[in-house]
Image (spheres, rainbow, N blue to C red):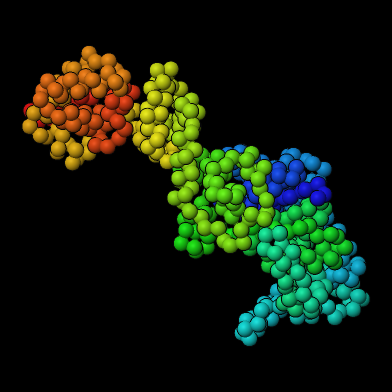
């Protein structure tokens, strides 16, 4: 295989989302697998829809995801510029060459004429098709009208019959009837290129060997192949990756996969989990393997394991994978990742003291296995990082309002004042006290959990109290005693 060069060519029309990241990722994996180059080209010729600062937005998304382009804006590999809007001179030059060679022609039909024709096609239930009106004009008339300043678009002189086969590396051979294609527009009246034309000129000039892109572009591929033929250039190989469907198999919507990556970030998903999940969205590494890193994916990636059928986006699975990665994090790493979420909720200060950090780390580790995302983890940690303000109502009824509850909580506070504050020491102290009082251990354990956390469920009490420490534990038990029934 020649030196592999793939490109990811997003239009800067919105925030990077799951579909965006999956296409970028597959390109990156393919490039890595074949020792090739992954190029980013920003397709911003449609200035009306282009979003300012797209490059920064894309760079931030790549940075979060943990992989990035080898060549692109600001990373010149000799094939720039990498903003399509800066390549318009090339598009105009190639369009001029095609005009000179008679492979393209100027079309002077007005938008109104074109629209009237489309309406007629629609009325008759025919696919809309340019009828070739301006094909017939003589070279002389063309020159005269162009020189006279009449607005025109440039159309490709497309073959009128026969078929063309796309040898897609994922879909296999897909044949298209050329009679269904018309003389499509290459350059618009305002002198800017259409997507199909710009994309082909740029891919050719950037020496792209493989085009990996979303399935929705398969229908553009016959047009692009005809263009390569007209330009006398060899077409790259094409691979159309399956589209992503929402869990209900509807088209991806904002509610599901089109959710911006920023939102996954905000919800406390870990990038390595998101990337792992995206790798499985339309590709499988073989066997029933579910967990793999970017590096492992780059070693294993192959197009023959990319599925043809749509990939169904499954929030639950993504959350499950996230929980797996969350559990793998060591204490320090967990703290680094969770701290912004704790700070955002005012649970730890921006610049925590060593003691505050140590306590937060212990709380995070205690709650680690009880959360699927960093947001859930912060939520769980809040229970111990702040004094409980709200208490579970049913719990209060059962554990604080039963006769003698205050006495039991006070006795427990007194006993724990002198206990050894580790799980074993606490268990021994509570077991001993329960024996002396002639009550079941549960009659101390449940009220104690409610007193220190406000909740009736949570991590094991002894572990929880050892993390809380003597001072907080005793204070919270006494506060609870003060409100409990005597
Ligand atoms: N700018 C196009 C898009 O964002 C690129 C399609 C392609 O990869 O050719 O859909």
Examine the rendered structure and indicate whether residue 356 appears above or below residue 383: above
Examine the rendered structure and indicate whether residue 57 appears above or below residue 281: above
In the image: residue 416, left or right of residue 290 = left
Report whether residue 73 is seen: no
Report whether residue 322 is seen: yes
Q: Return the x and y of residue 368 as percentages of the image width and height.
A: 41, 33
In the image: residue 81, left or right of residue 464 = right
Using the image as rendered, state which of residue 344 and residue 17 is in the foreground: 17
Number of numbered tags placed on the structure image: 0
Identify the residue shown where x is 55% and y is 46%: 289
Q: Return the x and y of residue 264 as percentages of the image width and height.
A: 50, 45
Identify the residue shown where x is 47% and y is 58%: 247
Q: Return the x and y of residue 68 as percentages of the image width and height.
A: 66, 41
Farthest residue, direction bottom: 124
Q: Quadrant of the C terminus?
A: top left
| Residue 124: quarter of image | bottom right
Identify the residue shown where x is 66% and y is 79%: 127
| Residue 471: quarter of image | top left
Q: Return the x and y of residue 432 as percentages of the image width and height.
A: 18, 20
Identify the residue shown where x is 45% and y is 35%: 327
Examine the rendered structure and indicate whether residue 206 appears above or below residue 360: below
Farthest residue, direction top: 418
Examine the rendered structure and indicate whether residue 221 appears above or below residue 460: below
């Amino acid at each position: 295989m020649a030196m592999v060069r793939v490109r990811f060519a997003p239009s800067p029309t919105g925030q990077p989302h799951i579909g965006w990241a999956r296409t970028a990722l597959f390109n990156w994996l393919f490039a890595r697998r074949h020792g090739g180059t992954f190029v980013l080209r920003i397709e911003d010729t449609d200035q009306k829809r282009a979003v300012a600062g797209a490059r920064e937005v894309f760079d931030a998304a790549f940075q979060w995801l943990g992989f990035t382009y080898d060549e692109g804006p600001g990373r010149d590999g000799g094939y720039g510029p990498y903003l399509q809007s800066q390549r318009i001179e090339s598009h105009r030059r190639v369009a001029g060459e095609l005009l000179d060679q008679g492979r393209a022609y100027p079309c002077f039909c007005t938008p109104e004429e074109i629209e009237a024709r489309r309406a007629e096609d629609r009325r008759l239930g025919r696919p809309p098709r340019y009828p070739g009106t301006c094909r017939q004009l003589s070279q002389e008339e063309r020159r005269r009208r162009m020189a006279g300043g009449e607005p025109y678009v440039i159309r490709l002189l497309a073959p009128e019959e026969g078929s063309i086969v796309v040898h897609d590396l994922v879909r296999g051979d897909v044949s298209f009837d050329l009679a269904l294609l018309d003389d499509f527009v290459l350059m618009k009246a305002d002198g800017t290129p259409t997507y199909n034309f710009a994309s082909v000129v740029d891919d050719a000039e950037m020496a792209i060997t493989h085009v990996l892109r979303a399935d929705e572009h398969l229908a553009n591929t016959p047009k692009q192949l005809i263009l390569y033929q007209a330009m006398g250039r060899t077409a790259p190989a094409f691979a159309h990756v399956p589209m992503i469907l929402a869990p209900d198999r509807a088209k991806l919507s904002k509610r599901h996969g089109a959710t911006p990556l920023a939102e996954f970030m905000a919800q406390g998903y870990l990038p390595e989990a998101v990337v792992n999940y995206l790798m499985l969205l339309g590709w499988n590494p073989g066997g029933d393997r579910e967990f793999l890193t970017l590096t492992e994916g780059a070693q294993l990636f192959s197009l023959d394991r990319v599925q043809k059928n749509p990939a169904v986006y499954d929030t639950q699975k993504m959350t499950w994978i996230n929980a797996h990665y969350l559990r793998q994090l060591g204490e320090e790493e967990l703290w680094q990742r969770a701290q912004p979420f704790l700070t955002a909720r005012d649970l730890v200060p921006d610049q925590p003291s060593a003691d505050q950090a140590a306590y937060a780390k212990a709380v995070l580790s205690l709650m680690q296995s009880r959360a699927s995302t960093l947001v859930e983890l912060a939520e769980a940690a809040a229970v111990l990082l702040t004094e409980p303000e709200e208490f579970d109502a049913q719990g209060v009824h059962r554990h604080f309002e039963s006769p003698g509850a205050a006495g039991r909580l006070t006795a427990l506070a007194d006993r724990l004042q002198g206990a050894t504050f580790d799980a074993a020491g606490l268990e021994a102290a509570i077991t001993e006290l329960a024996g002396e009082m002639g009550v079941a251990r549960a009659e101390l354990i449940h009220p104690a959990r409610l007193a220190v956390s406000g909740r009736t469920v949570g991590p094991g009490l002894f572990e929880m109290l050892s993390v809380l420490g003597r001072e907080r534990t005793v204070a919270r038990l006494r506060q609870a005693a003060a409100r409990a029934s005597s």
